[in-house]
Image (cartoon, rainbow, N blue to C red):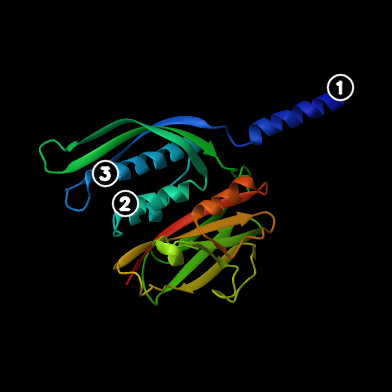
Amino acid sequence: MNFIKKFIIILGYLFLIFMSPSIAEIVVETGKHKHLGKNYTKFQSCKIAEEKAKKKAIIKSLGQTISSEVVSNCSEVDGEFDCERNQLSLFELNGEITSSKITNKVYDKELGTEILFCEVTIKANVEPIKKNLDPTFQFNVKLNQEIFRSGENVEIEIDTSKKMYMTIFQWLPYGGKKYNVITKIFPNKEFNKNTNDLVDGKLVLKYEAYFPEEIKKNKVDEYFIFVASEKKINWLDEYAEIEGLRKQFSKTNILMEKHYSGYMLIK
């Protein structure tokens, strides 16, 4: 084998090392949940604190940025317990906690107040899912507002850095078989007449917000999951649970970029 061939093989090996996602990482993080003792039990409060710790572990390991829309919803939407679990599921689309262990748990009152809190520290094993490593392949997403009433238009504005195939999933984590599903709303002619998923520059879409009558709450949190890819991917029209979509992200070798936007829907 001559010198040039050896040099090419070494370069290829180094490329695989530096361009591949990082290996699993052990992360220690702490999550804290405060409450007044009326809406949460000790178990629920500590469970929320644990979910917060897991989310922070993924962010710490992968450098995941959090959109203001996703964060603000949890303090406003009924059922903070469910909302924290929903957020963790979103961040697990970029990295997966394969195992975790609670190393410390404190349940007490804030000094000099009647505010209760649970603080949980975990040791978690975080494994990354394939990430976009091309700085020229990116896009931004903006919603016309963060809170919608049933019947109002949800306007989605997408700006892309280059031509890319765009897919939008909607997640309605209400529980039950009918609503706790992941639905592909773009491209999908049942939701929008525009089905041209090859976007170059700017794309503006409009959807009507709909609050299902079967849901007894006055407000709920919903999420859009945006996936851009360099090649067309034959996604399913519906996934039974968010874990099913996450599995597709982990096994594909196609360059992708993912964004999430949360919003509130009021009856």
Answer with the quarter of the image where residue 102 lies: top left
* Mark earlier in primary sequence (3, 2): 3
Q: For the residue labelled by badge 3, is the local secondary structure a helix, a strand or a loop? A: helix
Cα separation, mark 3 vs mark 2, equals 11 Å
Q: Is residue 112 left or right of residue 154?
A: left
Q: Is residue 109 above or below residue 200?
A: above
* Residue matched to label 2: 81
Give the side of residue 123 with respect to residue 232, left or right. Answer: left
Can you tell which of label 1 and label 3 is closer to the viewer?
Answer: 3
Residue 136 numbered mark, or none: none
Inspect the image, locate mark 1, and give the three-letter code of the amino acid beneath it: Phe
For the residues marked 1 and 3, what is the alpha-carbon distance in whole angstroms? 64 Å
First along the sequence among labels 1 and 3: 1
Q: Give neighbour class at mark 3: few <14, some 14-19, many 20+ (Cα, 10 Å).
A: few
- The tag earlier along the polypeptide, 1 or 2, is 1
Amino acid type, residue under disc 2 in the picture: Phe
Disc number at residue 3? 1
Q: Return the residue nearer the eye: 267 or 201.
A: 267
Q: Residue 256: x percent and y percent?
A: 62, 50
| Residue on which the image places disc 3 | 43
Of circles 3 and 2, which is in front? 3
